[in-house]
Amino acid sequence: MTGSPVAPTKRTALLGLVGACHPVPSLAVTAVAVLLAIGVGHGAAGVVLIGAAVLTGQLSIGWSNDWVDNARDRATGRGAKPVAAGRVPATTVAVAAGSALVATIVLSLLVGVYAGVALLVGVVAGWAYNLGLKATPWSGVTYLVAFGALPLAPFLALPGHPWPPWWVPVVGALLGFGAHFANVLPDLRADAETGVRGLPQRLGPRWGVVVMALALGASAVVLGFGPAGTTPLFAFSAAGAGLVGALITAAVALRLPDSPAAFRITIALAVLDVALLIATTT
């Protein structure tokens, strides 16, 4: 039995809008950028500006994802998605995504031209993923590009626009690539029903876990042994901690394939890597 959808209340719509922005990854990516901005020496104003630029970019990506995927989410009965569940109108989410996109363009360019371009490259990659690349073998490229570009911005926003050490964007790109698999693995069955055939879907759950673990482990090895002048103790400790984290993430993904737990562990690993990255660049 079906009927006309009930219009959500203002409170329900507001909560739905918050849920539709993918708050956990949006806040995690913003926190990573803020921590890195603090670590490389930005003052309060610079940290706030970089954080605002990254946050609005992540909001635009999160909202556009739920807006674009609305029909697909409804078809697979994803009640956890606020738009598909009718808790917030799709038009509201579309307007929010567009507004956040305009805001991140302005804020990113206020950070500086070079840093702004790095930030906007990540936003473009996220939108490209949402608008179609997620269903192609190139889905992982968007994460490589976005998370490889993100750590460039705090460095390029410094006076003189210094380029970071080579290993900084490499660690970011590998973490992003691993996060792509960790994020998608719980949705493989639903994606198969709607024809989404990104790289994780094509590899399948077991090979997807293997690739995820290899990417996360590789990021730890690069972080441990890439920086010049660090002690062997730091190199082996950083690499070892990251490799253990990668194995734990893989074990959780295999044991709880429908849970976001592996993705959340990946976020924790990213924060740990940022702390280690700051320790080696300051």
Image (cartoon, rainbow, N blue to C red):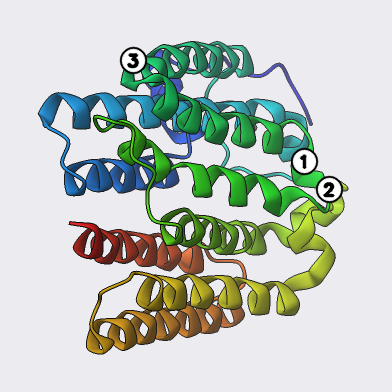
Residue denoted by label 1: 133
Q: Earlier in the sequence, mark 3 or mark 1?
A: 3
* Contact, mark 1 vs mark 2 (Cβ under 8 Å): yes
- In this picture, is 95 found above or below 159? above
Name the residue at 31% across, 82% down: 235
Tell us which disc is closer to us: 3 or 1: 3
Left or right, residue 178 beside residue 73: left
Amino acid under label 1? Leu
Left or right, residue 165 beside residue 101: left
Packing grade of label 2 (10 A; few <14, some 14-19, many >=20) is some
Q: Position of residue 133 (x, y in %)?
A: 77, 40
Q: Position of residue 24 (x, y in %)?
A: 40, 46
Q: Quadrant of residue 159?
A: top left
Name the residue at 74% across, 62% down: 200
In the foreground, 2 or 82: 82
Tell us which disc is closer to us: 3 or 2: 3
Q: Position of residue 4 (x, y in %)?
A: 71, 16
